[in-house]
Image (cartoon, rainbow, N blue to C red):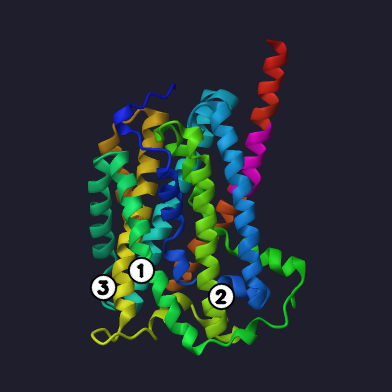
Amino acid sequence: MDITIKDTEKVSPFFAFFLIHSVQIGVGILGFQRAIVKSAGYDAWMSIILAGIANQVILWLMYELLKRGNGDLIYIHRKIFGKWIGGFLSTLFILYVLLAATVFLRSFTQVVQVWVFPQLSTWIFCAVLLLLACYYIVGGFRTVAGLCFLSVIYSLPLLIVLYFPLHYAHFYNFFPLMTHSPMQILQSAKATTMEFLGVELLLLFYPFLKEPDKSRRWGHYALLYTTIFYIAFAIVAFVYFTEEQLKSTIWATLSLWKIVEFPIVERFEYIGIAIWVAVVVPNLCICLWGANYGMKRIFSFKRRRVLLILALIVFLSCSLLTSHPHIEKLNVVFSEIGFYFLYTYIPFLFLVQLILYKVRGQQG
């Protein structure tokens, strides 16, 4: 199915920066330190750099894949594998995007329940955020892109609060350097997978970028900024907490916010979580928009009807996840799927497309 996107639905190339970065900075940054420190200890900051470099390579592969295919992932699947197999693979990707929406929403709901409102019903909070997301999605892709822009702006003030823990910093925690093996650092880099997931949504919104090839540098800038963002939060946590404390602290970033004090604010983490709603809602919007757009492309369904069905699926999935072990398990499964999609399937698809185009070019 060919792609025809009106110019009024497209956004400027530099919006790739906000679309990619906003979906990567979500719930994961509130407690990623625990996952990466288990394998590499205080050397885990190196694993973030490795993960950032690996994602830059994957993003380059994606742009080459999309440029050569002249369309989104659904169109590329159809051209390479045919209608039925291509449709099946695209449906799997849409289910993956829907899983991402569920993970983002339920994980943040858990944070709110643990830190702010212990008696809050899961279904009420999820229903409110899903209705809000659907309202924005109905406004079109440009509305979603505008939300992503605002979420990046809203997250900037929270960088300032990293200054407060530095008053109690122990920089000697980093020494001696390189006390872990390369394999342990690689394992830690794999643990950062979930924090960098979201870049793959480029495979869906690529046609909505004006002159999409010009958005390359903005996409790479977004990944660089994301990498710096995570390194900053990791380093501050490393110099504040002991290694054993980090291994047992589920939300290290939120724990750092607890020590921030202002004359009129004692519990800054409440404000931080409230601000983070403006960061998580765009995450939810871009994922639901991607799933909705994909279903329309594959099955020619009407978008608004399918959107309500997809939102209902996410709502029911979140309601069924009632305990922390269940949510933790879902995050692990999502991270594993994302890891193999990014680092196995994308290179595989790139090579298959490259070979087919060369063969067809020689035959032509």
Magenta residues, as a range?
342-351
Q: Which amino acid type corresponds to the residue marked 2 in the rendered image?
A: Ile
Which quarter shows the N terminus? top left
| Picture coordinates of residue 236, whole percent (x, y) | 52, 78
Camera-side mark, 3 or 2 = 2
Say which element carries label 1. helix
Name the one closer to the observer, 110 or 3: 3
- How far, Cα to Cα, is label 1 from label 3? 27 Å
Q: Mark 1 points at which residue?
A: 157
N-term-proximal mark, 1 vs 3: 3
Relative vertical location of residue 136 with respect to residue 106 in this rendering, above or below? above
Q: Which residue is drawn at 64% across and 86% down?
A: 172
Q: Which amino acid type corresponds to the residue marked 3 in the rendered image?
A: Leu
| Picture coordinates of residue 10, whole percent (x, y) | 35, 34
N-term-proximal mark, 2 vs 1: 1
Camera-side mark, 1 or 3 = 1
Q: Which amino acid type corresponds to the residue marked 1 in the rendered image?
A: Pro
Name the one closer to the observer, 314 or 167: 167
Q: Name the residue under label 3.
A: 120
Is-magenta flag for residue 347? yes
